[in-house]
Image (tube, rainbow, N blue to C red):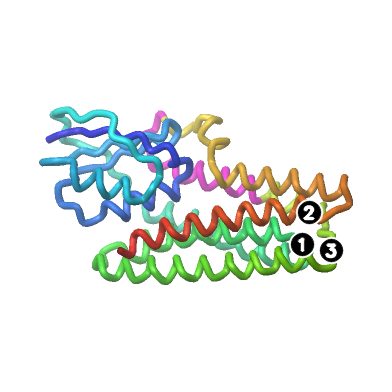
Amino acid sequence: MKKTIFKISKMDCPSEENLIRMKLDGILSIVNLDFDIANRKLTVFHNGEINQIEKSILELELGGKKISTEETHQSEFKENANQKKLLWAVLSINFVFFLIEITTGIISKSMGLVADSLDMLADSFVYGISLFAVGGTITKKKRIAKLAGYFQISLAIIGFIEVLKRFFGDEKLPNFSTMIIVSVFALIANGICLYILQQSKNKEEVHMKASMIFTSNDVIINLSVIIAGLMVNWLSSSKPDLIIGTIVFILVIQGAFRILKLSK
């Protein structure tokens, strides 16, 4: 058996891990996958050549690069029986915060919160595809991925249209305090999700490194919305909120295209 290590430069949260798992699902030569999100590394234990595996990883456009391949005698791998339960937990947290953020975003007139809610929904899609496709056929998985990807893009486009209407039309000043308070809770929720998922790793990794939390795109987005809220209050302008909303909508669409790659 061989062990190949990949550097995945854009793998900064568990949703990317699930995307990679789904992409590699069905490749019979793979014996085990070992993810190190903190260091953005993936170790693939496999039989035979690495070509098909490497091609699949590169297709996701997550900055994958093969570092090394070597023979290994390792034959035992730790499997977590609670993985499905953990995925359900983070799916629930992400979906609940999608509902909270999109509701408060509409009420407070904040496009930053609305955009962040779609980012939460995107993560829910990834975890949902992982769960609902378990034990199913590859065709079923691809069908779910395609529906999720197009739905995500549709919502983001609607968001873009609303941003343009507000940018060129009458300025609607968002409620900055709601933006900050909800984003702080979303930040805590993302930290909890990362902690929950880390329970499936080795026991010595249970106490997550701070660097792991703060390299997550989700956390960076939450902090950006908080900063935008402060800028809205300081400048008495909706522009910071619209700018952050636009950036997050772009990230949501990029994530949707990654999901669509799974349907090919």
Q: Is residue 240 left or right of residue 202?
A: right
Q: Is residue 82 at all visible to an observer of this figure?
A: no
Q: Which residue is mark 3?
A: 171
The span shown in magenta is 186-204
- Name the mark on residue 220: none
| Rendered location of residue 192, percent (x, y) | 56, 45
- Name the mark on residue 239: 2
Are there few (<14), some (14-19), or many (20+) residues within 10 Å of tag 1?
Answer: some
Image quadrant containing the N terminus: top left
- Callout 3: SS: loop
Q: Is residue 73 above or below residue 131?
A: above
- Name the mark on residue 167: 1
Image quadrant containing the C terminus: bottom left
Q: Nearer the viewer, residue 240 or 15?
A: 240
Q: Nearer the viewer, residue 218 or 163?
A: 163
Instruction: Give yes or no for contact between labels 1 and 2 (Cβ–Cβ under 8 Å).
Output: yes
Q: Main secondary structure of the magenta part?
A: helix
Query: Disc 2 or 3, which lies upstream in sequence?
Result: 3
**Image-quadrant location for residue 231:** top right
Q: Residue visible at 29% across and 29% down?
A: 67
| Rendered location of residue 174, percent (x, y) | 81, 59
Which amino acid type is marked by label 3?
Answer: Glu
Are there few (<14), some (14-19), or many (20+) residues within 10 Å of tag 3?
Answer: few
Q: Residue visible at 66% across and 69% down?
A: 161
